[in-house]
Amino acid sequence: MNTLAEAPKQTERSEREIIQSLQEEVSASRLNLFLQCRLKFYYRYVLRLKKPKTASLHLGNSVHSALKAWSKARWLNKPLTLRELHDAYSKAWADISEGSVPWETGEEEEAKTTGWRLIDTYIRQNTSMAQTKPDAVEVSVEADLSHHGLPRLIGILDLVQEGKIIDFKTSSSTPNQTTIEHLHELQVSSYAVLYRHNTGKQEKGIELHHLVKLKNPKLSITSLPPMTQQQEHRLFHLMDTYYEEVGRAEFYPSPSLACMGCEFFGECRRWT
Ligand code: SF4
């Protein structure tokens, strides 16, 4: 097991219990992180080290929250005006803020404006979507996969509309259409399994809605077909690997370009 001078003290027993609970339940983001870097997974989910939120994450969370309000109002047949949506965004920005992001002077206002421009672009380019009542909004779901010998799968579906699963994302560059399906496969397959498990139906497709933070904000929609059996097998195989390998508690660094944005870079450099 790794030892770290700066990590909060946890008894051997409590760490084992945490690992056991991580084996019992997994989400797509947890699984992705484990496959990306086990040490980062260890810092975030076993040691639970807290780090200040980044400006980019704060913006993404606030935009996400405003789009949730927009979808929920449509679900209630009480669509929001642009003004009401702006208010919902400002409230989300302030509520999430709580001084957690170490903003430079003037940076927060600029980031907040960028976020609003993304939402405004999204709403203006989605007039047909605005007329349709969603099937579900921001719903927490889980699937008991014990009959496959797998951990419970959990997740939150941002939006389900006309039988399609829709996921919102903010990004700083336009997604590459040749790699996007591969990069998001675990998440997309997890959503499909959760949807089928909870509705008894096959999804009509999955859409990734990327709100891209360019000088002129852009919306990039990727439409994917329903999950194939091969994709389901791949997901289940990786969940099985996760279960086995989390249980071994071998958490080591996997240096890659992703280290440039890793919040645990300092801890990782001191890891032995
Ligand atoms: S810096 Fe890189 S190798 Fe280290 S924990 Fe972060 S992602 Fe893993």
Image (cartoon, rainbow, N blue to C red):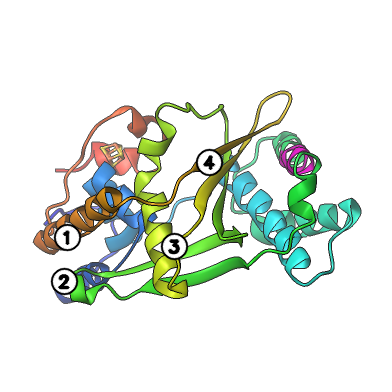
Residue carrying label 1:
240
Q: Which mark lies nearer to you, 1 or 3?
A: 3
Residue 28 — which label? none
Residue 202 — which label? 3
Residue 149 — which label? 2
Kindly tell me whether mark 3's CB lies below 8 Å from ligand 1. Answer: no
Q: In the image, is residue 190 above or below residue 139?
A: above
Q: In the figure, is residue 85 to the left or right of 170? A: right
Give me the C-alpha separation between circle 4 and circle 3.
16 Å
Q: Secondary structure at mark 1?
A: helix
Camera-side residue: 265 or 114? Answer: 114
Q: In the image, is residue 151 above or below residue 207?
A: below
* Residue at (59, 65) in percent of width and height: 138
Q: Amino acid at mark 1?
A: Asp
- The earlier-in-sequence mark between 1 and 3 is 3
Magenta span includes 155: no
In magenta, the rendered stretch is: 115-122
Give me the C-alpha separation between circle 1 and circle 3.
23 Å
Can you give x and y, in whole percent of width and height, for residue 12 in the image?
A: 14, 71
- The earlier-in-sequence mark between 4 and 2 is 2
Q: Amino acid at mark 4?
A: Ser
Predominant SS of the magenta segment: helix
Give me the C-alpha separation between circle 4 and circle 2.
31 Å
Density class for disc 1 (Cα within 10 Å; few <14, some 14-19, many ≥20) is: some
Is there CB contact under 8 Å for labels 4 and 2? no
Is there CB contact under 8 Å for labels 1 and 4? no
- The earlier-in-sequence mark between 2 and 1 is 2
Location of the C terminus by quadrant is top left
* Residue at (19, 43) in percent of width and height: 271
Instruction: State whether residue 248 appears in this view.
Output: yes
- The earlier-in-sequence mark between 1 and 4 is 4
